[in-house]
Amino acid sequence: MDTHTASRQIATPPDQAALPAHWSRNRRDFLRILGSGAALAALGPLAACSSSNAASPTDELRNQLLADERFWTEVAGMFTLDPTRRFMNIGTAGSMPKVSLDLFDSENRTKARESGNGYSNLLAERTQVAPGFGVDPDELAFSANTSSGMCHAILGIDWQPGDVIVTTNHEHGGGETPMAIAVARYGIEIARVAMPVGNNQNAALYATLFDARIRELRTQGKRVRAMMFSAPTYKTGTMLPIAELMEIAKLHGLISIVDGAHLPGMMAFDYAQLGMDFMSGAGHKWQCGPGSTGILIARNKIRASNPLPLPNWYPIHTSSWTPRARTTNGTATWDIAATITACGSLHTPMFHALVSSCALWDQIGRKKIETYDLALSAYLKERITEVWGVDRLYSPKDDPKLVSAITSFNPFTNPADVMNSAKSGEFVARMLSDYSPGFVIRNVNFPVIGAASDHYAIRISTHLWTSVGDIDRLVDAMADLSRKMG
Ligand SMILES: Cc1ncc(COP(=O)(O)O)c(C=O)c1O
């Protein structure tokens, strides 16, 4: 093993004093109600049981969010975002908190002053971050970003000609590209499940869709070997139900690869419990680390959550590897995350800044952040439903297993205009230029079952610096712009 040790300085987490004073760890409030993301599924029965003059579910959500507003305003104060804009495209890029920026800055200067190297597999840093993701340090690697993690995962597998990966038709280029390389290089095949859109769907549907597709392919004599899917998709924000889909992967003995670009920093998942072979996430999106950082979870031992053998896998980007068999039991035979992380001299300040951001998330509480992000998103989805109607949502809202903090919808007076790419692009541009504060959002195109051409939906990400007032202003501005654009 050829692992050099860099002189490393581990990012120290901000002390408790840096956290907002108004956060009560014992708050019983809506966080528990929304703990599983079941915003209105939980509030619905409450609303139904209460008297006729009770608040609507939307008002209920709003009130609950407002009750915690002071805390989140102070959290927002930990970032350096331009106050003349509202940043709601975190699905594309996050923003480092001040504590990480300061660390990055000072470490960069130290590195320059001392001509420091970056030969390391970052074991100490992985050890610090791994518990927040429910895994051991040998199962959490630092990658360059989601796309890099997807290349590590997909291109490392010992594909044989004729192997089939079952995936969806709503995947990102970060996963599509390594699959296309594997098609060209190893002769594998890609089979797809057509993605439903909108609120009229549930988690069980995805298990049925994947199971049926796998059985159909096997009936045709195809050698289905892996499942790859995004959770959530970057198009509709649909959280493909990982636990349910892992049951299908296990049932059919498949390698499981999750494009989880949006998971770190948004969702408080326990990856050892979920048991997928690979989950590739971004460090620079919801987790708010620096650009060119990612978190790749790689299954490296057998747990009850996934008793399938570990796949044969070879590193494709490393300077630290010795051929060794993978374990067949609960004890790892080698540190796969070290091999993935170590590739020549790394820019250690960058990864230390990511570790510092992860430490801040751990201190605030990953579940608390998830709950807030999902509650904001649930509120936005309800507001969109009130103004435009539920049929305009591409994102599901009522099945708690399918929700994420990404919301996609059609804002146009004439619904068919959502197929007009130029008009959709203009909507995004004018939401920034025509309003004060300007709103940073994006559009995203995707096929819809039965539609003649792609839909260009408007996509909004709600994160820990967003407030209820921001969402109200956003909805008002979007309604105004959709009227003006006709
Ligand atoms: C689902 C999904 N996968 C992969 C990527 C690529 O992310 P990265 O820039 O971290 O490689 C994105 C980026 O938006 C994404 O949404």
Image: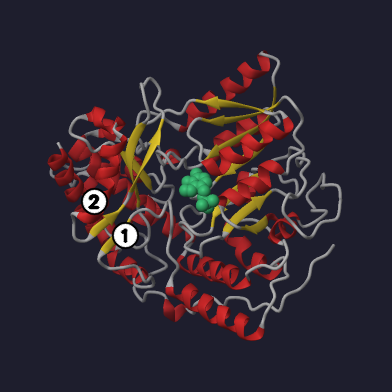
Assess whether mark 1 and mark 2 are in contact (beta carbons under 8 angstroms).
Answer: no
Residue 431: which disc? 2
Secondary structure under the numbered disc 1 in the rendered image: loop
Residue, x 72% and y 62% (percent of image)?
342
| Mark nearer the N terminus (2 vs 1) | 2
Picture quadrant where residue 66 is located:
bottom left
Residue at point 36%, 22% (across, down): 451
**Depicted 187 relative to depicted 298: above or below:** above
Callout 2 amino acid: Met
Q: Quadrant of residue 450?
A: top left
Q: Quadrant of the C terminus?
A: top left
Q: In this view, does 101 lie above or below 139?
A: below
Give the residue at mark 1.
Answer: 466
Asked if disc 2 is less than 8 Å from ligand 1, the answer is: no
Left or right of residue 189: residue 13: left
Residue drawn 34% across the image and 31% down it: 455
- Can you say whether 15 is above or below 3 in the image? below
Q: Is residue 302 left or right of residue 75?
A: right
232 on left or right of 219: left
The picture quadrant where one finds residue 155 is top right
